[in-house]
Each structure stands twice: as structure tokens, then as C-alpha cells.
Amino acid sequence: MKLNAFERAAMNNPLRAAHQHHREARWLRRLAGGGLSGQQVLEVGCGRGIGAEVILDRLGARNVIAFDLDESMVDSARKRLRGRQVQLSVGDVCDIAQPAAGVDTVVDFGIIHHVPDWQQAVAEIARVLRPGGLLLFEEVPRQMLDTWAFRTLTAHPRENRFDAEEFAAELARHDLHGAGGFERHLGGMVFVGAARKT
């Protein structure tokens, strides 16, 4: 699903960018065991390109392949990331245009909870990760999506949502393990974790 006007404003502002560059980068660096130095990283749902900046500048990736369902967001990311080691495209996390076992790490900055068939998104992420590859994720649990603010102001799918334990179980179904140690942040508004493909 594409973001509505409220979500676009909430996700595309300097405070959100600063949070990603500092707090979220620290969380993911720790979960990645110190960073992603020299890796080829796929970012699902790139938005206006802040996540790709974090992956390159804070996590040390060699290059980033990134896509978003929203063409206007990809255009914004292209402007922001001009000259950087980033390949951008319009794409769908449920049908990732990458070969199987082709990337070292996948990063999800809170995209999968927007996807109606989120299980298919997890399956696609597992498909493109090489054996031993890493998924780093930040996600919003069902109980937050069920609050008045999320129901009223956002356009998230209402059915087939997940909590952290259900998300970890779905990852394990696709041989992505290690998410049992996820962390809750921002008063439980998000959970973050890492899972490695066996």
C-alpha cells in the first residue's frame, strides 16, 4: 500500500530523518554485529532515500539496491542519492526483481506492516538473501495499528496483521532465524530485530 498524505508527512520530515540517522542506525548497527561493511544491501521500501543514506553512511555498506512502490518517492530518492552507490527502481516487496540468493543483507525500515500479504513479502525477502545473509527489520506491531490514531490517520491494512512473535514465527518458516531476541522501542510502538538465513 502507498502512504496517505498524513503518513507521507510523518515519514518525510527532518525529525524522522534524524531519528533514522542516529537512533535507528545505532539499533541496526548493534543487531548487525557492528555494521554492514563491504556488503551489497537491498532496502525494501526506500521512500525518499533516507534509509539508503543510513545503510551507506552509518552501517558502511558497499552499495545499496533499493525500491519503492511509490514512483514519486523513488524520484525523490534519485535526487537525494545522485552520485551515490545506489540503484533505485519502482518495485513491489511481494515480487522483488532480484535473483535468488543474490544479496548479503535486506533492510526493512518499517515497510512490511504496510503490505496486505506480508507473508509473501517475507517469502520474497528470504528468496533473495544468500545463505547466511541477514535481514534487519524495524516493524510496527498489530496492537499499535489497532490504536485510534493509527486507525483514524493512516491507511494501513486492517486484516492479517502481526505482532512481534508472529513476525518471528513467519521468518522462521522461511529459514530466517535469530529474531527471538527482538527489541521493543518507543514505548512498544516498534520492534526491531535481525534474522539470518540458514
Image (cartoon, rainbow, N blue to C red):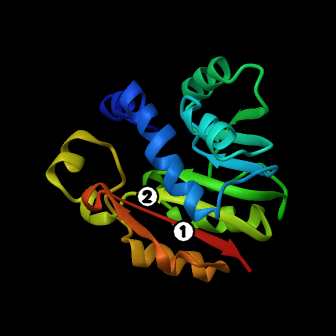
Label 1 neighbour load within 10 Å: few <14, some 14-19, many 20+: many
On the question of residue 13 being in view, the answer is: no
Where residue 163 appears, x then y in whole percent? 36, 71
Label 2 neighbour load within 10 Å: few <14, some 14-19, many 20+: many
Task: Name the residue type under label 2.
Answer: Glu
Q: CA distance from mark 2 to mark 1?
A: 14 Å
Where residue 24 appears, x then y in whole percent? 47, 48
Where residue 13 appears, x then y in whole percent? 39, 26
Which residue is more in the foreground, 40 or 101? 40
Depicted 5 relative to depicted 82: above or below? below
The secondary structure type at the circle numbered 1 is: helix
Where residue 66 appears, x then y in whole percent? 69, 40
In the rendered image, the quadrant that contains the C terminus is bottom right
Depicted 69 relative to depicted 83: above or below? below
Which residue is drawn at the image coordinates 30% and 31% (left, top)?
6
Which residue is drawn at the image coordinates 22% and 49% (left, top)?
151
Left or right for 175, reference 156: right
Which residue is more in the foreground, 189 or 90? 189
Which residue is drawn at the image coordinates 34% and 33% (left, top)?
10
Left or right for 163, reference 174: left
The secondary structure type at the circle numbered 2 is: strand
Q: Quadrant of residue 58?
A: top right
Task: Name the residue type under label 1.
Answer: Gln
Left or right for 52, reference 118: right
Depicted 14 relative to depicted 125: above or below? above
Residue 139: numbered disc: 2
> Which residue is denoted by mark 1 in the rendering?
119
Which residue is drawn at the image coordinates 71% and 45% (left, top)?
60
Q: Residue extending furthest front?
A: 34
